[in-house]
Image (tube, grey):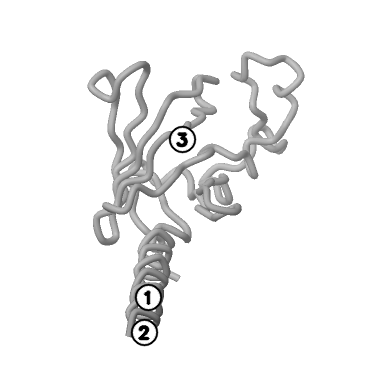
Amino acid sequence: MLKKTNITLLLALLFCFAASAQKADEILGKWINPSGEGQVLIYKKENKFYGKLVWLKIPDRDGKPKMDIKNPDKALQSRPELGLELLQDFTFNGENVYEDGTIYDPKSGKTYSCKMTLEGTSLKIRGYVGISLFGRTEVWTRVKQ
């Protein structure tokens, strides 16, 4: 009898972990920023979430690809903006919130702490310095496939 109970508990626990992983993966896919200037593909590496710039409305300047010219690291200023990993190291907290990550802003060359909240087809991106109270929120929209 005890063995049956242990197996049942183990199976229930495995089901909960699988359901949580599925919920976490709801963020995966392409998202467009509010200005419509760029699209970010959010993907997963191991148990963390990342996002890279995969589309720009205006991908070049004077016929040349836009470069990461505002980056404070001179060695990185020659890399193209298209393909930049803007979102890094997010973990899912189980409540539609992805936290403990960073967001890079190529317009300013600054990296901010960040948390993301998934609400249906909207993704609230909050970048901040120090604590979340001191920050700015943008709402990205899922790109329809």
Pointer 1 residue? 6
Pointer 2 residue? 4
Pointer 3 residue? 101
- At numbered mark 2, what does the secondary structure look like: helix, strand or loop? helix
- For the residue pair 22 and 66, the one nearer the viewer reads as 22
User: Is residue 4 depicted above or below 35 in this figure?
Assistant: below
Contact between marks 1 and 2 (CB within 8 A): the answer is yes
Rate crowding at label 3 as few (under 14), some (14 to 19) or many (20 or more) other CA atoms within 10 Å: some
C-alpha span from label 2 to label 3: 41 Å
User: Is residue 9 depicted above or below 26 in this figure?
Assistant: below
- For the residue pair 14 and 20, the one nearer the viewer reads as 14
C-alpha span from label 3 to label 1: 37 Å
- At numbered mark 1, what does the secondary structure look like: helix, strand or loop? helix
- At numbered mark 3, what does the secondary structure look like: helix, strand or loop? strand
Q: Nearer the viewer, mark 2 or mark 3?
A: 2
C-alpha span from label 1 to label 2: 5 Å
**Looking at the image, is mark 3 or mark 1 earlier in the sequence?**
1
Q: Say what amino acid the circle numbered 2 marks.
A: Lys
Quadrant (top left, top right, bottom left, bottom right) of the N terminus: bottom left
Q: Residue at x 70, y 22 (%)?
A: 77
User: Is residue 104 depicted above or below 140 in this figure?
Assistant: above
Q: Quadrant of residue 99?
A: top left
Residue 124 percent across, percent down from the top left: 29, 43
Q: Residue at x 58, y 50 (%)?
A: 54
Rate crowding at label 1 as few (under 14), some (14 to 19) or many (20 or more) other CA atoms within 10 Å: few
Q: Quadrant of residue 20?
A: bottom left
